[in-house]
Amino acid sequence: MSALAWILLASTLAGVLSMALAAAAMAVRVEWLPVMVSYAIGALLGAAFLEVLPHALEGGGDVHALSATVLAGILSFFVLEKLVLWRHCHTQTCDAHGVGALGHGPSDHGRSGLMITVGDTFHNFVDGVIIAAAFLVDVRLGIVTAIAIIAHELPQEVGDFLILLHSGYSRVQALTLNAASSLATLVGATLGYFALSPLSAALPYILAFAAAGMIYVAVADLIPGLHRRAELRHTAQQIALIALGVATVWLAGSTTHGWLGQAAHAH
């Protein structure tokens, strides 16, 4: 398949799974969220350090410039969060919105739900651009990146759906908002393909910036929530699930590399 076909397939799949997860969230037990968060952390960090950054270095970019790009990316995502006064609620409580993801406390008449939708739409758009950038470099990298992004969507979509319900939206309204937000992934991927294709020399730095986003989300948004469960049993479970997330990315990368190699040899 062409790079555009891969990009459209991966971004559409991410959007469809996003909607499916939001629908399934109605039956999800909240105590499962930390489990999904731990796995997502491993997937994000594995994709950033085992796939995205190595490909950025292999793309011919200057090592010092790429390192500076990662640093600038992390600082940019920090500033972005400060500007929009919003952060994803991946865990059981959400201090940024002043409401609990468990549904505790009074409804805020849709305010936190609106913030979640706006933030999630922007996040999905950026995910689409990241998917496009990865596939433009290498199909294997694109597949691994898409897997990591989809894994990250697991806790995000469940947590966001719970907040929408708590914010006063009905189940149908929450699903509709989630569906509209998920379309941003496809839009970002399509625009990213046409905008990034002429800028092939800049792709290593775009990948470095994308890796910064993955690292920031994992370290700043997800990991702090795990420290709320400091018991030895929970800590061991978190470490095992993070390792599983990393292993999934490594296995996906190895498998797709072998599959693509066989396909190229066959042709």
Image (spheres, rainbow, N blue to C red):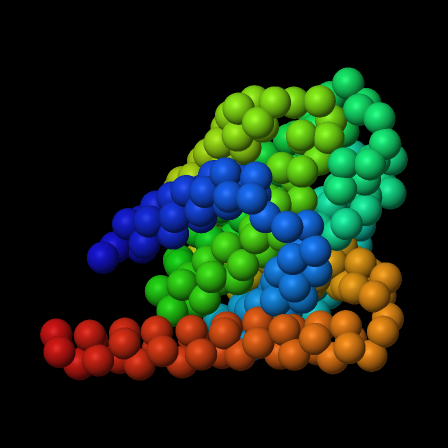
Query: Which residue is depicted at the point 74% across and 58% down?
Result: 222
**For residue 262, above or below residue 23:** below
Question: Does residue 150 appear left or right of residue 239 in this picture?
Answer: left
Q: Give the image location of residue 27, x and y in percent.
A: 56, 44
Question: Does residue 224 appear left or right of residue 46 in this picture?
Answer: right
**For residue 29, above or below residue 99:** below
Q: Nearer the viewer, residue 51 or 252?
A: 252
Q: Nearer the viewer, residue 79 or 115?
A: 115
In the rendered image, is residue 20 in sight? yes
The residue furthest left is: 267
Look at the image and tell me in which quarter the N terminus lies.
Answer: bottom left
**For residue 77, above or below residue 224:** above
Query: Which residue is depicted at the point 62% across and 60% down?
Result: 36
Q: Residue 241, located in which quarter of the rendered image?
A: bottom right
Q: Give the image location of residue 164, x and y in percent.
A: 67, 30
Q: Give the image location of residue 156, x and y in percent.
A: 63, 48
Q: Residue 41, located in which quarter of the rendered image?
A: bottom right
Q: Give the image location of residue 31, x and y in percent.
A: 70, 56
**For residue 265, above or below residue 16:** below
Total residue callouts? 0
Query: Which residue is depicted at the point 42% across and 73% down?
Result: 252
Query: Which residue is depicted at the point 46% across and 58% down?
Result: 146
Q: Nearer the viewer, residue 266 or 158?
A: 158
Look at the image and tell me in which quarter the C terminus lies.
Answer: bottom left
In the rendered image, is residue 82 in sight? no
Question: Does residue 218 appear left or right of residue 1 in this picture?
Answer: right
